[in-house]
Amino acid sequence: LLTQHRCFATVGSKEIEVDNEMHRKHYAITGVGQRSKVTCNTNTNHTLEADVPKKMGGGDEAPQPVEHLLAALVGCTQATAVYVGRMMKPRLIIEKIDFNIEAYRDERGALSLPISELPTIPARLQSVSGSVAVHFKNGVDVSEEQLRI
């Protein structure tokens, strides 16, 4: 039995449909793993590879999955900032953004044995932090008010 759900949000006094199939962007990835390394192909014709370090049983031949996660955070932040700057009035054209992002976790959580029991230490990132420096085209100065959007 297939059911169709519609999602709405209220913006001001107006209700809008937020999950309109006509406006959905579709993402798909296929992957093949051999030993600890996986090669993925996207529906946009890109290839991503992931592996784990040798001390975790991997070959260390590609970025770790968590490094892809952090790269996705940086990539989404870059794309959003450039889009927002371009849509502002007056326009703020970003020349470049410098990112310095760090994350940590206690690897004992991911390596905890026996595998059939929940680890006492979480196997997730415990902290993500960093700094971002935005450089505008032609050295434009941006006011605090423009940054509060």
Image: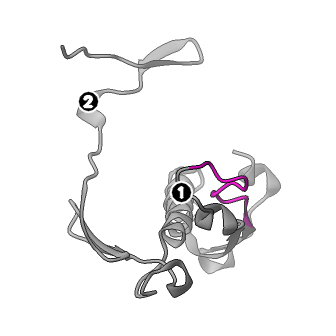
Picture residue at 52% right of the left edge, 56% below the top? 80
Residue in the foreground of this view, choosing between 102 and 132: 102
Residue in the foreground of this view, choosing between 148 and 39: 39
Contact between marks 1 and 2 (CB within 8 A): the answer is: no
Residue 20 picture location, percent across and down: 31, 27
- The amino acid beneath tag 2 is Glu
Picture residue at 63% right of the left edge, 57% below the top? 124
Coloring applied to the structure: one colour
Magenta-drawn stretch contains 124: yes
Residue sitting farthest toward the right: 144
Residue under pointer 1: 115
Would residue 25 be found to the left or right of residue 14 on screen?
left
Q: Secondary structure at mark 1?
A: loop
| Lower sequence index among marks 1 and 2 | 2
Q: Residue 29: which quarter of the image?
A: bottom left
Magenta-drawn stretch contains 32: no
Q: Which secondary structure type mostly characterizes the magenta part of the structure? A: loop
Would residue 1 be found to the left or right of residue 63 on screen?
left
**CA distance separating discs 1 and 2:** 41 Å
Q: Which residues are magenta?
A: 117-129
Residue 51 picture location, percent across and down: 42, 77
Would residue 77 be found to the left or right of residue 45 on screen?
right
Residue in the foreground of this view, choosing between 103 and 15: 103
Residue under pointer 2: 21
